[in-house]
Amino acid sequence: MECAPVRSSAVTFRQFEYFVGVVQLGSMSAAARKFGVSPSAMSQQMGVLEDSLGHKLFGAGARRSGLTKFGREFYKHASNILDSVDQAISIGEQFPDGMITVGTTPTLANKMLPSLIQRMPHRRGVNAIEIRSFCDMRALSSALDSGAVDLALGPLRRSSAKFVHVIGDEELVVACPPNQEGRLRGSWDRLAEMPWIRCAPSSDITDLVDREARRAGVRIRYAVTAPDVTAALNLVAHRVGVALVPLMSLSESSRAVTAIRLESPLQRSILAHATEMTPTVEELMRILTEAVLPRPVEPTRLCAV
């Protein structure tokens, strides 16, 4: 059964709350106590609501808590409206003032963002930062386009971002087990003889390896697919194979890994993308543009291929 047309100018949101409260609590007096009004005021408001609707909501009786057929149907709609309002209000709790979500690569999340975030709590309007890690730059672009992240930082090629800033270039090197650089020093032909570790199945690093291998006329054999660069470096340290990794991912703890710098260095541009320049995003974007990509600790051996 459909409710009769409601004259919205005559019905108030408070009357919806009162009515639903009467039904749920079972009496006018209980609803009056809940909302802090007198029973007579509650009864009067229910009478005004019935006049506005042009239908009786309650059956005959002193307690006036039993619903008519129209009242039962109207209650369904009224309670749904209140639920929708509650849900709409709760959305605000998911978007606190000063909250920013940054999507980036695992390497940048570990090597670049910590020093920047250290400065953020002292910045005006920034209360909380969430970092999300992406190995697949297409997934990062999609997250930015959908609004899942406020700012995307990484080697993004394209997105719907209105604001793009170039942060700098990062070099990629071939990580190999110690004492292997001598026999791999020759060319891509020798690198192709090694088992390779893929850094995530959809990583743009994998695309770079495949592109360079095609240019050299060789075929790369992937032995293991790692979830990220850190896992790939651990596999290299255990002599499972070689992997192309960002140079900044190496540190003093990388003594079990040798980095081979390619004769024609592989570089990719790191950019910051944002679709909306909110005050919080603008503040972080400014800090990023002032930043310098971290210099990695030089690995134990750095050879040219």
Image (tube, rainbow, N blue to C red):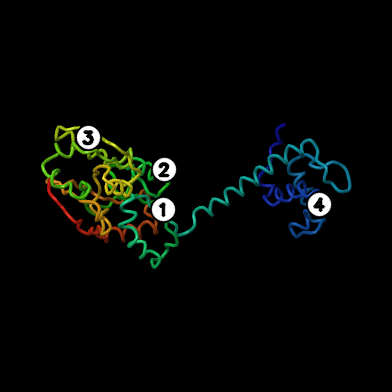
Q: Residues within 10 Å of mark 2 (few under 14, many from 20)?
A: few
Read off the residue under disc 3: 220
Measure the C-alpha gap from mark 2 to mark 4.
Answer: 47 Å
Read off the residue under disc 4: 28
Read off the residue under disc 2: 146
Q: Position of residue 232 (x, y in %)?
A: 30, 46
Q: Nearer the viewer, mark 3 or mark 4?
A: 3
Closer to the chain start, of discs 1 and 3, is: 1
Residues under numbered marks 2 and 1 in contact, where contact means CB atoms less than 8 Å apart = no
Measure the C-alpha gap from mark 3 to mark 2.
Answer: 35 Å
Closer to the chain start, of discs 2 and 1, is: 1
Q: Residues within 10 Å of mark 3 (few under 14, many from 20)?
A: some
Measure the C-alpha gap from mark 3 to mark 4.
Answer: 78 Å
Closer to the chain start, of discs 1 and 4, is: 4
Q: Position of residue 211 (x, y in %)?
A: 20, 36
Q: Quadrant of the C terminus?
A: top left
Q: Nearer the viewer, mark 2 or mark 4?
A: 2
**Residue projecting furthest to the bottom:** 122
Read off the residue under disc 1: 101
Closer to the chain start, of discs 3 and 4, is: 4
Residues under numbered marks 1 and 4 in contact, where contact means CB atoms less than 8 Å apart = no
Q: Nearer the viewer, mark 1 or mark 3?
A: 3
Seen at 71% across and 36% down, the residue is 4
Q: Nearer the viewer, mark 2 or mark 1?
A: 1
Amino acid type shown at disc 3:
Ile
Q: Secondary structure at mark 4?
A: helix
Amino acid type shown at disc 1:
Thr
Frontmost residue, 198 versus 264:
198
Q: Nearer the viewer, mark 3 or mark 2?
A: 3
Q: Quadrant of the N terminus?
A: top right
Amino acid type shown at disc 4:
Met
Q: Secondary structure at mark 2?
A: helix
